[in-house]
Image (spheres, rainbow, N blue to C red):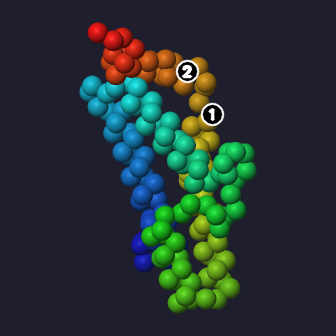
Amino acid sequence: MLLDYQNYLFFEFATPVVQEFERVNSLFQQTRADPHELYQHIFLHQKNVQNRLYDAKKKNRKNIHKVDFDVKFLTICNKFLQQNNSAEDYLETAIVYERCVSMPEGAVGQGTCRPPSTRDNFESLSKLSPVIIFKTYVF
């Protein structure tokens, strides 16, 4: 399957994205996870995914040429286009770019559509972290 150019590009794009999601997911599977740290990790992860796709105001999606694709992914695309520079190959690559954007775009949508009360509860729970409590009280 990876001999197909499009499949190979999807694989190269998805690998680092999936690895980052797995890293964040593994934090939530810890036995003694600190809610404060979990909240910070999930918030930072969501912000990083948003920054790949949207401008600083997070209202407008970046132009496809300004989206933060992984360097390895872009290198592979450029190498392919140097070897095969027909109009059909450029169109095929543009389609792959658009489809690759839909993956993190869906993740951003899922992260922002969560009920605000759930996020607020999680943030409130993070305030019960020993790190936060001991910073508040000086012994």
As drawn, which residue projects farthest toward the front? 139
Task: Tell me: residue 139, above or below residue 104.
Answer: above
* Residue denoted by label 2: 120
* Residue 83 is at least partly visible in this image: yes
Mark 1 touches mark 2? (CB < 8 Å): no
Query: On the picture, is 47 further left or further right than 11?
Result: right
* Residue denoted by label 1: 113
Label 1: element kind: loop
Query: On the picture, is 102 further left or further right than 9?
Result: right
Provide residue 79's location: percent of width, then percent of height: 50, 83
Label 2: element kind: helix
Task: Tell me: residue 115, above or below residue 42.
Answer: above
Disc 2 crowd, CA 10 A, few/some/many (<14, 14-19, 20+):
few
Q: How many marks?
A: 2
Q: Amino acid at mark 2?
A: Asp
User: 74 or 56, which lies in front?
Assistant: 56
